Image (cartoon, rainbow, N blue to C red):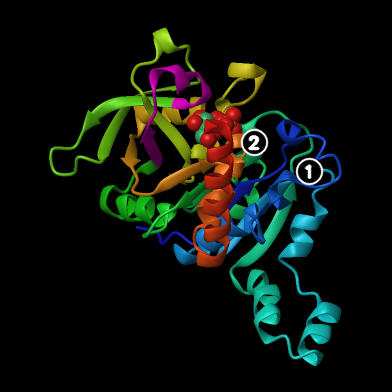
Amino acid sequence: MQRIRKAVVPAAGLGTRFLPATKAIAKEMLPIVNKPSIQLIIEEAAASGIEEVIIVTGRGKTEIVDHFDAHPQLELALARAGKEALLREVLRPTQLVKISTVRQQRPLGLGHAIACAAHLVGREPFVVFLPDDLVDSTRPCARQLMDVYEQTGRSVVALMNVSRSEVSSYGIAAGEFSAKDPRLLKISHLVEKPPAEEAPSTLAVVGRYVLEPEVFDYLLRTTPGRGDEIQLTDALAAMASKTGLYGYLFEGDRFDAGDMTGFLLANLNWARKSPQMWRAVEQFVALHRTNQDS
Ligand code: G1P
């Protein structure tokens, strides 16, 4: 079995849900406390053992690439001022993984965005990270899927349970759970954003996928689906019925940073890691709860 070394991060979307904030800034650069959200994604990739990340970008996304590049002038200024801790933070994004980029020239869908990276991935298994999905977990979410891939030798998608009213926002999977591992699902059905009454289950696909290179062949044959876009889910549904596909109910907390409330909750979650910041949040909430009650 080939070792997984590469990952693809599609980041070409316009970020319309965050306008006007994203008029001149890539949505992936919006900060979760002090880090652009895409840095959390690349940190998860590095912690999972990924060595090379291909970011699929579009117009107006150059600052993403700048963020993971060196900034000699700033580094020198921080070093001269003796600001060692800040210097480490500035250097960190440059030390995580090797970054390459490719442009998606037209917004033809997630499946198309992944296919844009085919020539850089080559014929080897890889991980897809959707940057809107932030996961806080003890064992990195992607690593959990990579371990499943090492056991099964098949593509694996991350799953979580959602309420029936939410199924129309996700890819929904159904199949049979393994007798040995209650988190492992052999997928027989996969459908992109079904209406609640048509959903085959409430098991939603979260933005982490370990994919065999054959996915590129399936993507080439995938015609536009929901939203008239080339959907990764449709290519994976075809794979599930031919070569096989697994789902894994990962351990960890997932935040939808592509949604304003989810983004706020993600900020609170990461702020919780600083006792000082968290005390301020608690005081703020306590004060406003009292005001509301009175
Ligand atoms: C994408 C996928 C969907 C998946 C979701 C997870 O949708 O198409 O299958 O469940 O990510 O966040 P998006 O949220 O980008 O519309």
In the image, which disc is placed on residue 248?
Answer: none
Disc 1 target residue: 58
In the rendered structure, the answer to whether residue 75 lies left or right of residue 133 reads right
Quadrant for ligand 1? top right
The question of residue 168 being in magenta is answered with yes
Q: Which residues are magenta?
A: 157-171
Let me know if residue 4 is in the magenta part.
no
Number of callouts in the render?
Answer: 2
- Looking at the figure, which quarter contains the C terminus? top right
Residue 293 in percent (x, y) is at 52, 32
The image shows residue 180 at horizontal and vertical percentages of: 13, 43
Residue drawn where x is 76% and y is 59% of the image? 65
In the drawing, what numbered circle is on residue 260? 2
Give 5 or 288, whichever is nearer the viewer. 288
Q: Amino acid at mark 1?
A: Gly
Find numbered disc 2 in the image and state the secondary structure of the residue it sits on: helix
- Is residue 178 placed above or below 2 in the rendered structure? above
Answer left or right for 30 relative to 246. right
Q: Quadrant of residue 162?
A: top left
Disc 2 marks a residue whose amino acid type is Met
